[in-house]
């Protein structure tokens, strides 16, 4: 019995050590920048390859806390807890609220709270090196052009996040352009006339009984 407990404790210790070793292998962005500076010149690009789920429009409408057309501008970029990744916070200026089924309770009073959107990725300078981290198929939201965004609300941090990488669209030449570089999302939404896309959203909002 003692040997069994000892074996169990040994296996548990090895498992914890393996997890700790795995975590220890993840360099911080500052460490990566320092290594990059000693061997190369120019910016350091760090990309992730993620699995992207493309939802039908009806599902996106049902799962969103806020659907709007807006202009965005970056406010700040900050590190993840383990300092190995960046996030960018955008402020959205609404052009048109298409649906808001679950209005948020803003934490800042008085006056209207800005619509803040957190997106994975960003750029910052570490040890004299510009570090750019991003999803390989979904870069940061573009500024200076109207976007249609499907958002979910994080009440704890009082900000929104994209429903998914396939839930952000630009409006160019009066047509919808998915920001996710994917053949699947392009086949589903690419090239749809803007007016038709808005009508489709509104029809799904009415069909699902959501508030506009």
Image (cartoon, grey):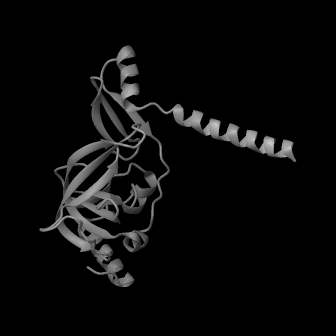
Q: Residue at x 59, y 33 (%)?
A: 21
Q: Residue at x 30, y 69 (%)?
A: 66
Q: Quadrant of residue 122?
A: top left
Q: Is residue 175 left or right of residue 24?
A: left
Say which quadrant the C terminus sits in: bottom left
Q: Is residue 13 left or right of residue 184?
A: right
Q: Quadrant of residue 3?
A: top right
Q: Quadrant of residue 78?
A: top left
Q: Residue at x 39, y 15 (%)?
A: 39
Q: Is residue 130 above or below residue 149?
A: above
Q: Position of residue 50 (x, y in %)?
A: 48, 47
Q: Position of residue 46 (x, y in %)?
A: 40, 34
- The reply to whether residue 149 is visible in this rendering is yes
Q: Position of residue 188 (x, y in %)?
A: 41, 62
Q: Position of residue 187 (x, y in %)?
A: 42, 58
- The reply to whether residue 173 is visible in this rendering is no
């Amino acid at each position: 019995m003692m040997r069994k407990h000892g074996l169990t404790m040994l296996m548990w210790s090895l498992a914890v050590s393996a997890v700790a070793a795995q975590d220890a292998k993840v360099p911080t962005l500052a460490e990566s920048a320092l290594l990059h500076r000693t061997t190369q010149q120019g910016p350091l690009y760090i990309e992730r390859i993620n699995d992207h789920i493309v939802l039908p429009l009806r599902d996106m409408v049902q799962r969103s806390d806020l659907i709007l057309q807006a202009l965005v501008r970056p406010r700040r970029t900050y590190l993840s807890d383990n300092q190995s990744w960046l996030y960018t916070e955008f402020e959205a200026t609404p052009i048109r609220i298409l649906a808001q089924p679950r209005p948020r309770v803003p934490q800042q009073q008085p006056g209207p709270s800005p619509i803040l959107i957190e997106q994975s990725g960003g750029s910052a300078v570490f040890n004299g090196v510009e570090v750019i981290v991003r999803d390989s198929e979904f870069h940061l939201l573009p500024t200076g052009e109207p976007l249609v965004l499907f958002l979910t609300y994080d009440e704890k941090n009082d900000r929104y996040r994209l429903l998914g990488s396939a839930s952000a669209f630009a409006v160019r030449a009066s047509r919808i352009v998915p920001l996710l570089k994917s053949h699947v999302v392009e086949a589903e939404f690419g090239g749809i006339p803007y007016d038709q896309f808005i009508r489709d959203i509104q029809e799904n909002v009415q069909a699902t009984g959501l508030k506009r």
